[in-house]
Image (cartoon, rainbow, N blue to C red):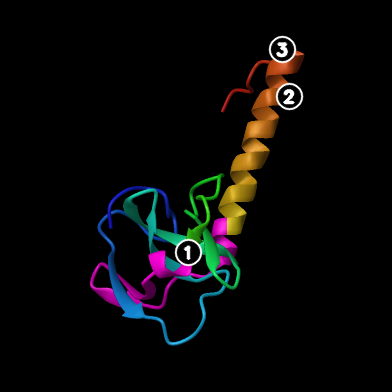
Amino acid sequence: MRGQSMAPALLPGDEILLAPWDRAPAPGDIVLARVQGSFVVHRVVWAGPTRLVTRGDGCIRADPPVPRSAVPYRVAAVRRSGVEQPPPPPQLADAVRRGRRRDAWVRAVRGVLGLERPAE
């Protein structure tokens, strides 16, 4: 793996095991998708009959919809530090995203009110 778009679920240096689909893609699945001409490993956030929408766990915005044919594989396992495990569940991604939104909101309010950031 390269990049931070799936952090903290997937980290740079993690190895992923890809598998062909044995069922229909569903929200929460981590997949290899061709998005705007590049391959990405992101999580399915919406699955329709002919199209999917993916998003990196570390991203706020979703990728544009892609046809199912642009998503040839799912992530079957992740190997980190030599230990193979199932793909991480989406709850971790949701918690990270909520935390980032909250932090952005707090920064915006402090800026509007002219408040100093508290000493850490």
Residue 6 shows which numbered tag?
Answer: none
Q: What amino acid does circle 1 point to? A: Pro
> As rendered, which of 104 and 119 lies closer to the eye?
104
The residue that appears at 28% across and 62% down in the rendered structure is: 14
Q: Residue 3 location, x and y as percent? A: 32, 48
Q: CA distance from mark 3 to mark 1?
A: 47 Å
The residue that appears at 50% across and 46% down in the rendered structure is: 59
Q: Residue 26 location, x and y as percent? A: 56, 74
Q: Are marks 2 and 1 in contact (CB under 8 Å)?
A: no
> Which quadrant of the structure image shows residue 13?
bottom left
Q: Does the magenta portion include 88?
A: yes
Going from the N terminus, do you reach mark 2 or mark 1 first?
A: 1
Residue 114 shows which numbered tag?
Answer: 3
Q: Quadrant of the C terminus?
A: top right
Q: On the picture, is 69 further left or further right than 99?
A: left
Task: Give the farthest residue toward the top.
Answer: 114
Q: On the picture, is 113 further left or further right than 36?
A: right
Q: What amino acid does circle 2 point to? A: Val
Q: Which residue is mark 2?
A: 109
Q: Which residues are magenta?
A: 68-93
Q: How many marks?
A: 3
Q: Are marks 3 and 1 in contact (CB under 8 Å)?
A: no
Q: Which residue is mark 1?
A: 67
